[in-house]
Amino acid sequence: MPLPHFLLMLTAVLVAAGVTLWVAVAIGIPLPVVGMLALAAAAVLHLAAPADDSGDESSPRHGA
């Protein structure tokens, strides 16, 4: 990936995260709740991902 594309993508992700936090605080959602929701969403996405059947022991799906 060319450097300008990478930097643009990185900037877009940081801006989106900042806007998300700003909106959450503006409507009165406490930051620990936002953090717990983010962790829960990450866990759901991790567990919903298809299993890697390549036999690679370094697979992120521990115990699956």
Image (cartoon, rainbow, N blue to C red):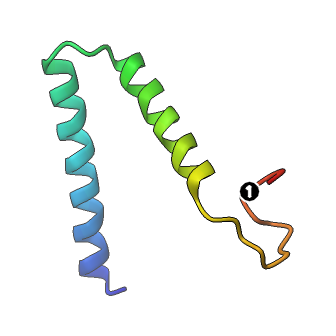
* Position above or below: 12 against 36: below
Residue in the image at 46% along x and 39% along y: 41
Q: Locate residue 19, reporting x and y percent.
A: 17, 39
Residue 48 drawn above or below residue 54: above
- Under tag 1, what secondary structure? loop
Q: Name the residue under label 1.
A: 61
Residue at 24 percent of width and 79 percent of height: 4
Q: Is residue 49 left or right of residue 53?
A: left
Q: In which quarter of the image is residue 53?
A: bottom right
Rendered residue at 22%/39% (across/down): 18
Residue 11 falls left or right of residue 57: left
Residue 57 at x, y percent in the picture: 86, 68
Instruction: Indicate the quadrant containing the C terminus: top left, top right, bottom left or bottom right.
Output: bottom right
On the rendered structure, is 49 left or right of 24?
right
Q: Which of 5 and 25 is in front in this view?
A: 25
- Along the viewing direction, whichever of 18 and 35 lies nearer the viewer: 35
